[in-house]
Amino acid sequence: MAKNSKTIPTASFEQNLWDTANKLRGSVESSEYKHVVLSLIFLKFISDKFEAQRTSLVEQGMGDYVEQIEFYAKDNVFFLPEQARWSYIQKHMKQDDIAVKIDSALHTVEKNNPSLKGALPDNYFTRLGLVTSKLASLIDTINNIDTYTSKTSANENGSSAIKSEEDLVGRVYEYFLGKFAASEGKGGGEFYTPKSIVSLIAEMIEPYKGKIYDPCCGSGGMFVQSLKFIDSHRGNKRDVSIYGQEYTNTTYKLAKMNLAVRGISANLGEVAGDTFFKDQHPDLKADFIMANPPFNQKQWRGENELVDDPRWAGFDVPPTGNANYAWIMHMISKLSEHGTAGFVLANGSMSSNTSGEGEIRKKIIEKDLVDCMIALPGQMFYTTQIPVCLWFISKNKKAVDASEDFAKRRNRQGETLFIDAREMGSMVSRVNKELTNDDIAHIAQTYHAWRSPNQEKDGSYKDMAGYCKSASLDDIKANDYVLTPGRYVGAASIVDDGFPFETKMAELSQTLFKQMAEGEELDKAIRNNLMELGYGK
């Protein structure tokens, strides 16, 4: 295991690790290289945990059991034969067959640990033909991640808290996923949803207890953020169970590794598969759904396929040219009696009438399933400039008894909250924006105040022009069942600056006349210059 002689600030460490690893990429495409880097980080992490457990067994006088799998599995540690350990890889990293050795190590890890079935790349390193010297340098770089250093630090109330090794490797993993998404551009959207959007969904639906489901889970970011939410609110992770599905095989593997490095147990199905044609959780009824389906997915089914699917019952068959409403109806069908779903869709989903989408939306609204709609700022995705929104679907809009597992809520039957957050967020690069922690807290507090009967605790809700509006079903009907927040919140109030209209108009008129006169002088100068050059009359 690597031992650092001094503490390095995590953010700087993440950036330095990325910069070093990225320089070694060479001719390998980013879409391929991410699997190389993240697989090695994963192998380093599980090896460090294995070595720590092995050392602990010896220190406890249990050296006779260091090769028995059950003494690792009981503490959620993967057992690794010698040739699958990081120390073995590092020892042989300069040999010409190092790629073969890494592939063999990953295969052995998966073979010896059933929970990792289908998670690790298969002959990936050998197939890519990486230059041995560059692969050795990458191994040396990743060796600087000291995943085993667990430190005790004081928390806000002064008591001690253990910072686990999963915190560091998880942050590195999350950082790399985001950087790969940014560097890949459009292709990166297959596996990554911006962290601030996922955080907002988690803060809105509060997945404390029950079943959490993501039908298009990508690299598992929704699940990670859900458990971070539970931790930050002092909940118990054992109170939730996780279900997901992912279509792309390589992304499915990323998700399984991403969850494994954090010690998260999840059912992602036996294999990668199409959610519409190979639903791996057909009987699931989830309490919480968090998702970022592919935007405006075209030709997702044939003209005569899935026309009688029970998921469309009570609505209409979704069009073949756009899967937005197929995703919505799939998620509605997966919700439990008191379930809530929060998901990202393209803005067109709020108003489109193409191919019967307007009629489907009308039926969803009339069934009183739409709890909240949020218009998000632009430039939030690395992958697309398509403006997006958040939908929140709820089957528990009516008041719920305090004795039940779900929080007591105000009776909001027949109402929908609209929030226009397009002016929020801060630029984090030349092209990308993200919601700040204050933005997320403000939006979530608005929603919870609207839903909560406890005015003293959560604050009272009031409509705010330009930002939020609680609209009735009649209001939505009057707007032709369009769900765009701007239709309802109106324009923000303009603060009166104290100057009479006549005074401002006179000043503006004088400025305009002056600019018009300057424009005439410029026109004359341009005309004279052209005539001197022989053009014009």
Image (spheres, grey):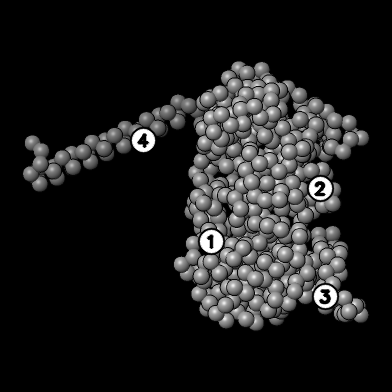
Of residue 133 and residue 203, the one placed in the foreground of this image is: 133
Q: Secondary structure at mark 1?
A: helix
The mark that comes first in sequence, 2 or 4, is 2
Cα–Cα gap, marks 2 and 4: 64 Å
Indicate the quadrant where residue 147 lies.
Answer: bottom right
Cα–Cα gap, marks 2 and 3: 33 Å
The mark that comes first in sequence, 3 or 4, is 3
Q: Nearer the viewer, mark 1 or mark 3?
A: 3
Cα–Cα gap, marks 2 and 1: 33 Å
Left or right: where 32 falls relative to 417: left
The mark that comes first in sequence, 1 or 3, is 1
Tag 4: residue type? Thr
Q: Residue 174, how many percent across, how many down?
A: 65, 59
Numbered tag placed on residue 511 in the rendering: 4
Cα–Cα gap, marks 3 and 4: 85 Å
Of residue 250 and residue 495, the one placed in the foreground of this image is: 250
Q: Residue 274, how many percent across, how many down?
A: 62, 43
Q: In the figure, 111 relative to 239: above or below?
A: below
Q: Which residue is mark 2?
A: 240
Q: Secondary structure at mark 4?
A: helix
Numbered tag placed on residue 32 in the rendering: 1
Quadrant location, the N terminus: bottom right
**Residue 149 visible in the shown view:** no
